Amino acid sequence: MSSLNTMTAANIEDLVLMVSRITKADRKMIFPFDNATIIMTELFRMFDGLSGHLMSIGHATPDVALAADRADIKLEEIIPSSPFSGDIKTAIAQIENQEDIIYLANPNKITGANYSLSDLEKLAQLVPKGALIIDEYYYEYYGISGISLLNLFTNVIILRSFTAPFGVYSTDTGYVIANSSLIEKIKSSVPNSKISNTVRKMIYTAMVNEEAISLRLKEIHDESYRISTALHKMEVLCRMTVADFLLLKVASSKDAGNFLNGYKVAVDNLDGYPSMRNYLRYRIESYYSNEKLLKAFEKMPAHYYQTKKIDRRRVTFRHPPEQQIQQHNQDEMEKMLRFEVKERKNKQVITK
């Protein structure tokens, strides 16, 4: 007998049908889950060949590393010269085995780097005996999906979140979209999802309310530009992304991060990721929460965040036209900052 707080098989099927309507995928190709790490662990085990490798294109988040460890498979990261831009040539050059498992968060959950649909197709062609796992956690923000590839390849798996569009991070629920035979294998090897009725109601409300999703995405975009503009005027270097976070380059991640935490502003220190030294990750919230970030930087000692060099590594937004506007805005802000720094130095020379 199932608990009153746990979804029944009928409720799970109801959730599957809702996803099917929204994604246009056959219901036999959909599997809801309550724990992404468990699903990834099982997928890694399913496709782990004798000679293949698990390759993460771009920085992998801790849950991916944990899943690889549980599956007893070594995780290798392919990091391009610019972590903020998808570099398909670098990825292709390092994938040599047809049995490799490729994991790609599109966009990347750490840096926002992203890949086009044609890039995804090239990757799927490289591993006909392996798998391409596309993590579309930020699909609603980015808009490019690999779902159409499911009609061409049997080795493509799509992962999505139920709640990320609404900024609900307290639950790890989501769903897999893949060919029906693979979904049957997942069903036979993964325990039934135990998504509570409370979470189910939240999921249903979130997915059917397109207007609310649109309003949230617009709010994230507007706040991203507002915060970035304000921070640049304070000489805090930041990068906008196609997701719901900003990347802040500071002189000392430890000092700046601790100072912000002291003002109850949550940030992630990215020093542990290759090529992300001196970067903080700030998830955009409501207007008033974002104001706490700006107020904290106004009070922060300048030597915690002021850096001598501007990070000129390339950033790419592939989703027109909104992300092209973001790219233009960011370019203009960086030009403004360089001009202000130059003017300040000129004034210092004249004063001396």
Image (spheres, rainbow, N blue to C red):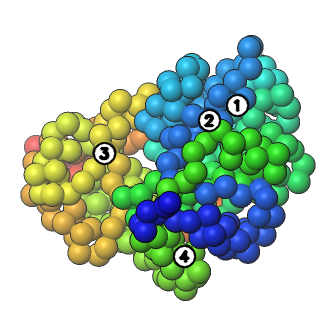
Asked whether the beta carbons under mark 3 and mark 4 sit within 8 Å of each other, the answer is: no
Q: Nearer the viewer, mark 1 or mark 3?
A: 1
Labelled disc at residue 46: 1
Asked whether the beta carbons under mark 2 and mark 1 sit within 8 Å of each other, the answer is: yes
Mark positioned earlier in the residue sequence (2 or 3): 2
Where disc 3 sits, the SS reads strand
Image coordinates for residue 75, horizontal then vertical, percent: 56, 23
Mark 2, residue position: 42
**Quadrant including the C terminus:** top left
Labelled disc at residue 204: 4
Image coordinates for residue 349, horizontal then vertical, percent: 18, 44
Identified at 44% across, 63% down, the residue is: 3
Mark 3, residue position: 268
In three-dimensional space, the C-alpha distance between marks 1 and 4, rounded to whole angstroms, equals 30 Å
In three-dimensional space, the C-alpha distance between marks 2 and 1, rounded to whole angstroms, equals 6 Å
Q: Residues within 10 Å of mark 4 (few under 14, many from 20)?
A: some
Image coordinates for residue 176, horizontal then vertical, percent: 66, 52
Q: Amino acid at mark 3?
A: Asp
Where disc 2 sits, the SS reads helix
Identified at 36% across, 58% down, the residue is: 170
Q: Amino acid at mark 4?
A: Tyr
